[in-house]
């Protein structure tokens, strides 16, 4: 994994990845970044069944948004597993959260590929789209992603991208971001607080 730091409205940090019960865990405030209104959270993408999906479709729910790709060898699967486990930690409160995975690799991440990838947990909503639509979605979250060619690999390329969990409020406005690598209990604690606050 590579780590790169850039200014994000004077406070944002980018980490690049190449690639039901109440919890006693405290909210990891040192890992939570408050976001400015420059983060729009707008997206118009395609779901696993091929139907159009936008941020407006989740009005009234908290959105937990993660950007990744299905060919990622280790980081993305780990963070996706944390998302799933955090939903389990929330129990019935998970119904108030829309867990969303937005592909940074729309060339390979077709709706069918996302459906297969998330067969283990149908609560997680996989989204993809045209390269332009995927870029627009990343821009709404100020997320960096860039293709890196792998000339000696059968994969041909990988995607370096920001590794964050984002929480958007019930109007779709991104409010906070957390660096990937949280435990399920830590992520659930942040979500529990966000459900009450937003």
Image (cartoon, helix red, strand yellow):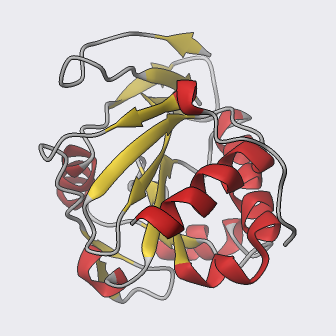
Residue 154 in the image: state x and y as whole percent. Answer: 64, 33
Q: Is residue 156 above or below residue 24?
A: above
The residue sitting at 72% across, 41% down in the picture is 26
Q: Nearer the viewer, residue 95 or 18?
A: 95
Q: Nearer the viewer, residue 157 or 151?
A: 157
Q: Nearer the viewer, residue 126 or 183?
A: 183
Taking 130 as reference, is 26 left or right?
A: right
Taking 10 as reference, is 6 left or right?
A: right
Residue 100 seen in the current view = no
Q: Is residue 13 above or below residue 99?
A: above
Q: Is residue 7 above or below residue 87?
A: above
What is the quadrant of residue 58 in the picture?
A: bottom left
What is the quadrant of residue 117 in the picture?
A: bottom right
Q: How many marks?
A: 0
Residue 96 in the image: state x and y as whole percent. Answer: 55, 80
Residue 25 in the image: state x and y as whole percent. Answer: 79, 44
Q: Nearer the viewer, residue 150 or 184?
A: 184
The residue sitting at 55% across, 12% down in the picture is 2
Quadrant placement of the N terminus: top right
Taking 76 as reference, is 20 left or right?
A: right
The residue sitting at 71% across, 36% down in the picture is 73
Residue 78 seen in the current view = yes
Residue 105 in the image: state x and y as whole percent. Answer: 42, 48
């Amino acid at each position: 994994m590579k780590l790169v730091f850039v200014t994000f409205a004077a406070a944002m940090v980018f980490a690049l990845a190449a690639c039901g019960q109440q919890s006693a865990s405290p909210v990891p405030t040192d890992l939570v970044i408050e976001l400015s209104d420059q983060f729009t959270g707008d997206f118009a993408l395609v779901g696993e069944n091929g139907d159009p999906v936008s941020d407006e479709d989740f009005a009234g729910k908290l959105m937990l948004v993660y950007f990744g790709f299905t060919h990622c060898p280790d980081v993305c699967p780990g963070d996706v597993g944390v998302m799933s486990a955090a939903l389990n930690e929330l129990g019935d409160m998970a119904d108030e959260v829309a867990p969303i995975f937005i592909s940074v690799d729309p060339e390979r991440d077709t709706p069918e590929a996302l459906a297969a990838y998330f067969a283990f947990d149908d609560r997680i909503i996989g989204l993809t789209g045209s390269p332009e639509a995927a870029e627009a979605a990343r821009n709404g979250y100020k997320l960096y992603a860039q293709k890196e060619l792998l000339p000696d690999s059968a994969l041909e390329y990988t995607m370096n991208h920001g590794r964050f969990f984002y929480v958007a409020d019930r109007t779709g406005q991104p409010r906070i971001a957390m660096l990937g690598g949280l435990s399920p209990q830590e992520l659930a604690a942040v979500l529990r607080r966000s459900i009450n606050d937003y």
